[in-house]
Amino acid sequence: GDSVTQMEGPVTLSEEAFLTINCTYTATGYPSLFWYVQYPGEGLQLLLKATKADDKGSNKGFEATYRKETTSFHLEKGSVQVSDSAVYFCGRGGSQGNLIFGKGTKLSVKP
Amino acid sequence: GAVVSQHPSRVICKSGTSVKIECRSLDFQATTMFWYRQFPKQSLMLMATSNEGSKATYEQGVEKDKFLINHASLTLSTLTVTSAHPEDSSFYICSARMGGMGNQPQHFGDGTRLSIL
């Protein structure tokens, strides 16, 4: 069935380091792709999305490009901050309008 | 932006108690609401999909008599965990979506931490 695979964490970086969190999805249909962020003790917040191939979603310095040829939607940020410490979930739209998530990647940014 | 309110944020209760969790879309009409369950260090697993005015569609392995879902209006869905037991302890998150298109983003509540003693 449909699934999303993202790199396992935790990922620990120093402030201002470059971040990449890999995400690949099963290629059934042409799903919308999302990145959600979950800060400690909170629910999920939409970080960015892309709805078709070659679209680039961006928000708060984070970017991800919908790559159909590699079925990927990797999340990147050029310079992370301590406040970016959170769990990041990659997701794709499911056939019933639901979201199918990866297992999440915990990011810790040290000052 | 779109706001989803989930209440309560935390519940601690005795085994055998039934617990109701509310999910409200505050500034939009949510045709569809979803209920997810998050286990420690794991992803969110879809429990059920709820469309306003109709019965919820449950995912395989989710007991519909255990997890009662009601979506009586376009702004409110409730999840009732009936006769809760310690294995039901988890983080439950609802989300709501406008319209019927799959590319509409879902907006999530802040979740409910349920602890059954």
Image: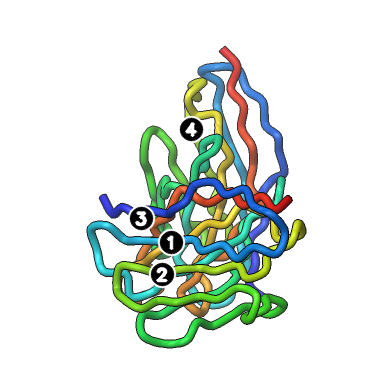
Calculate the distance from the C-alpha at mark 3 to the C-alpha at mark 4.
Answer: 27 Å
N-term mark: 1 or 3: 3
Which amino acid type is shown beneath numbered disc 4? Lys
Calculate the distance from the C-alpha at mark 2 to the C-alpha at mark 4.
Answer: 36 Å
Q: Are marks 2 and 3 on the same chain?
A: yes
Label placed on residue B77: 2
User: In front here: B46 or A92?
Assistant: B46
In percent of width and height, residue B25 lies at 31, 61
Residue at image coords 60%, 41%: A21
Q: Which residue is mark 4?
A: A77
Which tag is nearer the camera, tag 2 or tag 3?
Answer: 2
Residue at image coords 44%, 42%: A63
User: In front here: A7 or B64?
Assistant: B64
Q: Name the chain under label 3.
A: B
Q: Which residue is mark 1?
A: B22
Which amino acid type is shown beneath numbered disc 1? Glu
Residue at image coords 70%, 34%: A10
Tell whether label 1 touches label 2 (CB within 8 Å).
yes
N-term mark: 2 or 3: 3
Which amino acid type is shown beneath numbered disc 3? Val
Calculate the distance from the C-alpha at mark 1 to the C-alpha at mark 4.
Answer: 35 Å
Identify the secondary structure beneath mark 1: strand
In percent of width and height, residue B29 lies at 26, 69
| B26 versus A19 height, above or below | below
Which tag is nearer the camera, tag 1 or tag 3?
Answer: 1
Q: Which residue is mark 3?
A: B4
Q: Name the chain under label 2.
A: B
